Image (cartoon, rainbow, N blue to C red):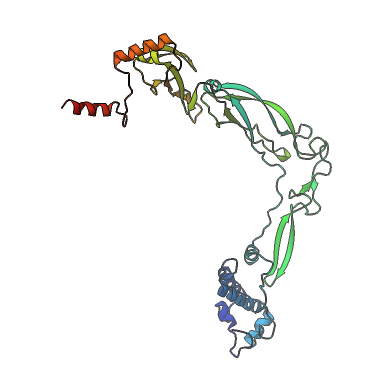
């Protein structure tokens, strides 16, 4: 209903209450409608217009004098006594502030403790593949915050103590009051003087400046278990940063950076390497000694071994490190054979190879299709013998 209409405005019907409703019933009805219609909740233009209307009506009915005028048949909004048609009556207030005003909620949190837990620290440690396989114990130097040994973490000069903040009276926060048609809306923010602690240190420790901790370099021993890999982390509890006010220290994490190996390539707990075998050795077969991470191993190469053959040495890989920190078995070592064909031959060597080729009928190469050697030759021969 617009101001100036000949039809009387239904104040009570707008809020959905009876004329005999108590102030509390009117307030509850408005709360319910405001939660549904507030622009922060319902962006629909019709809902926003409705919100302004019910807000203006509530402002009238919550005022005893204006409500009395309504009960006598008057229309305070038409006479300019309300805010209908004006700006948002909640201008300057967020929905959270409005709900606080509705339900009496307080944003007050009280002073926070000066003693806070410390942060975790991270340091990277380079290890060789052999060290990752065997496990090592290393002494590392870390740069972290430790407890101030002058004030034992309280941040005060000897013989002094913190005092209550005069600005916030020890509450750790500053309250501000804003008025609305609902009454006073109280919000609280951390005190800028004591930073929310509720107390200040008038005579801080000269060594730590009142922080309760100082930075220093210190040596820490870390035990790296066997089987670790690149990117894995070892946790040292309570060896990280000491917290402000002498709070408990965080953890120190040592992250492994595995250095590339000149022979082996790692795949989890398995290892791979390549062995170059002369053509003659691959044809005749041979045995070699292979240096592994645990010592020498015998590698038998059968006669007629082809290029690309893969041999497996069981349990010659890396230790299998479980989540419990224990080792359960080892991976395998996979040996990839690369048959080496000579690129330079003297006259005698070339003559011997020609004789071998004549003996074996291998003076010409054959085209292989889909991995089947000599397919075209066999097809040709089958036609020739028909």
- Give how far across and how far down residue 49 sits, in percent: 59, 76
Quadrant of the rendered image containing residue 334: top left
Asked if residue 244 can be seen in this view, the reply is yes
Quadrant of the rendered image containing residue 65: bottom right
What residue sits 61% from the left and 77% below the top?
Answer: 53
Residue at the extreme left: 386
- Give how far across and how far down residue 39 sits, in percent: 60, 69
- Give how far across and how far down residue 299 sits, in percent: 41, 14
Q: Nearer the viewer, residue 276 or 342?
A: 342
**296 relative to 191 in the view: left or right:** left
Q: Where does the N terminus fall, quadrant-wise?
A: bottom right
Q: Is residue 296 placed above or below 105 in the rendered structure?
A: above
**237 relative to 310 in the view: left or right:** right
Q: Nearer the viewer, residue 174 or 359?
A: 359
Asked if residue 321 can be seen in this view, the reply is no
Q: How many badges with numbers are in the image?
A: 0
Q: Is residue 286 placed above or below 338 in the rendered structure?
A: above
- Give how far across and how far down residue 145 sits, in percent: 71, 34
What residue sits 66% from the left and 34% below the top?
Answer: 240
Q: Is residue 324 placed above or below 360 in the rendered structure?
A: below
Residue at the extreme top: 348
Quadrant of the rendered image containing residue 338: top left
**290 relative to 80 in the view: left or right:** left
């Amino acid at each position: 209903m617009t101001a100036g209409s000949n039809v009387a405005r239904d104040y009570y019907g707008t809020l959905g209450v009876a004329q005999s409703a108590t102030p509390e019933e009117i307030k509850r009805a408005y709360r319910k409608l405001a939660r549904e219609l507030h622009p922060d909740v319902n962006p629909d233009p019709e809902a926003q217009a409705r919100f302004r209307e019910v807000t203006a009506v509530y402002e009238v009915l919550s005022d005893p004098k204006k409500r009395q005028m309504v009960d006598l048949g008057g229309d305070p909004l038409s006479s300019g006594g309300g805010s209908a048609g004006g700006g948002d009556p909640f201008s300057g207030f967020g929905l959270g502030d409005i709900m606080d005003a509705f339900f009496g909620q307080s944003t007050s949190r009280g002073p926070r403790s000066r003693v806070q837990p410390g942060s975790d620290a991270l340091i990277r440690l380079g290890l060789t593949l052999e060290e990752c396989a065997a496990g090592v114990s290393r002494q590392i130097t870390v740069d972290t915050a430790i407890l101030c040994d002058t004030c034992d973490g309280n941040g005060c000069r000897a013989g002094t103590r913190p005092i209550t903040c005069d600005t916030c009276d020890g509450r750790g926060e500053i309250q501000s009051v804003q008025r609305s048609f609902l009454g006073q809306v109280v919000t609280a923010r951390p005190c800028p003087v004591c930073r929310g602690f509720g107390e200040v240190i008038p005579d801080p420790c000269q060594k730590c400046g009142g922080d309760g901790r100082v930075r220093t370099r210190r040596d820490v021993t870390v035990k790296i278990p066997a089987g670790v890999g690149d990117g894995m982390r070892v946790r040292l509890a309570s060896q990280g940063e000491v917290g402000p006010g002498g709070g408990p220290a965080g953890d120190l994490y040592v992250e492994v950076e595995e250095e590339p190996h000149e022979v082996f390539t790692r795949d989890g707990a398995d290892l791979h390497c390549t062995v170059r075998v002369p053509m003659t050795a691959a044809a005749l077969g041979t045995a070699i000694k292979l240096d592994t991470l645990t010592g020498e191993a015998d590698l038998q190469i059968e006669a007629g071994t082809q290029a690309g053959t893969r041999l497996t040495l069981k349990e010659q890989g890396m230790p299998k490190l479980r989540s419990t920190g224990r080792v359960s078995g080892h991976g395998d070592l996979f040996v990839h054979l690369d048959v080496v064909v000579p690129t330079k031959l003297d006259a005698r060597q070339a003559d011997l190879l020609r004789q071998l080729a004549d003996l074996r009928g291998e003076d010409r190469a054959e085209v292989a299709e889909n991995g089947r050697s000599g397919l075209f030759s066999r097809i040709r021969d089958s036609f020739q013998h028909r």
